[in-house]
Image (tube, rainbow, N blue to C red):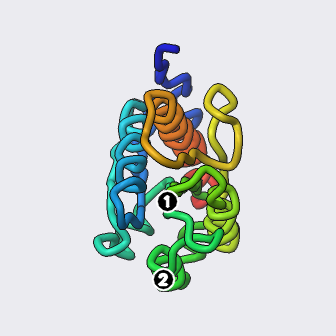
Amino acid sequence: MPIRLESSLPPDPFCGELVHVNVLIIYHSKTGRTKALAEEIAKGAGSVPGTEVLLRSVLEVTRQEFVAADGVIAGSPVYFGTMSAELKEVLDRFVGTRKKMEGKIGAAFATSAFHTGGKETTIMSIIQAFLIYGMVVAGDPLDASGHYGVAYSGEMTDEVRDHAARFGARIASMAAALAPLRSHNAS
């Protein structure tokens, strides 16, 4: 199936111009799987006109980058059915930014070595954190897998790459759709 990533976003309803948004993708990766999936998601997010994508490991991301993002996509390998301690530490450390994150888009992804590895519960643990931040959460689109977020185990396939790109494009599009509403309501 060919990948289709065109943005169907209308211009900003308040000024009629292309909306420019920042999407931050944060990941923790020991084996390289989660980083590889983050890179595929970034390609999809970057395909949406007006989107700037920032890809950061949990060791690199700053509070300023987190707050500046219109959308945050966070990913982790499965650790006992939940996000890694390294990703949780970032989300815990930035909890003081909650009021600045309210109304922004949040999404999650996960990887595991084995097909029954707890990917959905890991994604849900990240989504729970975003809900506490007051963020609007979204999963992957129905033309991908249509669940909580993109995930895979084992080796990456072309289908996973396609789903990751669709997921990234969806979250970037949603960030662009929500940004003018946040700006308009803040004024």
Q: Secondary structure at mark 1?
A: strand
The single residue placed furthest to the left in the displayed view is 60
Q: Amino acid at mark 2?
A: Glu
Label 2 Cα crowd, 10 Å radius (few <14 / some 14-19 / many 20+): few
Q: Name the spot of residue 34 as percent of width and height, x first.
A: 42, 56
**Does 152 appear above or below 7?**
below
Q: Viewed as shown, does residue 147 lie left or right of 109?
A: right
Q: Which residue position is annotated with label 2?
A: 89
Q: Name the spot of residue 131 as percent of width and height, x first.
A: 69, 67
In 3D space, how far apart are the residues under numbered discs 2 and 1 (Cα atoms)?
Answer: 13 Å
Q: Viewed as shown, does residue 100 lie left or right of 132?
A: left
Q: Which residue position is annotated with label 1?
A: 75
Label 1 Cα crowd, 10 Å radius (few <14 / some 14-19 / many 20+): many
Residue at (48% x, 73% y) in the render:
87
Q: Secondary structure at mark 2?
A: helix
Of residue 155 and residue 100, the one placed in the foreground of this image is 155
Q: Name the spot of residue 9 as percent of width and height, x first.
A: 55, 27
Residue 20 at least partly seen = yes
Res. 132 image quadrant: bottom right
Residue at (56% x, 54% y) in the render:
114
State which tag comes first along the sequence, 2 or 1.
1
Q: Amino acid at mark 1?
A: Gly
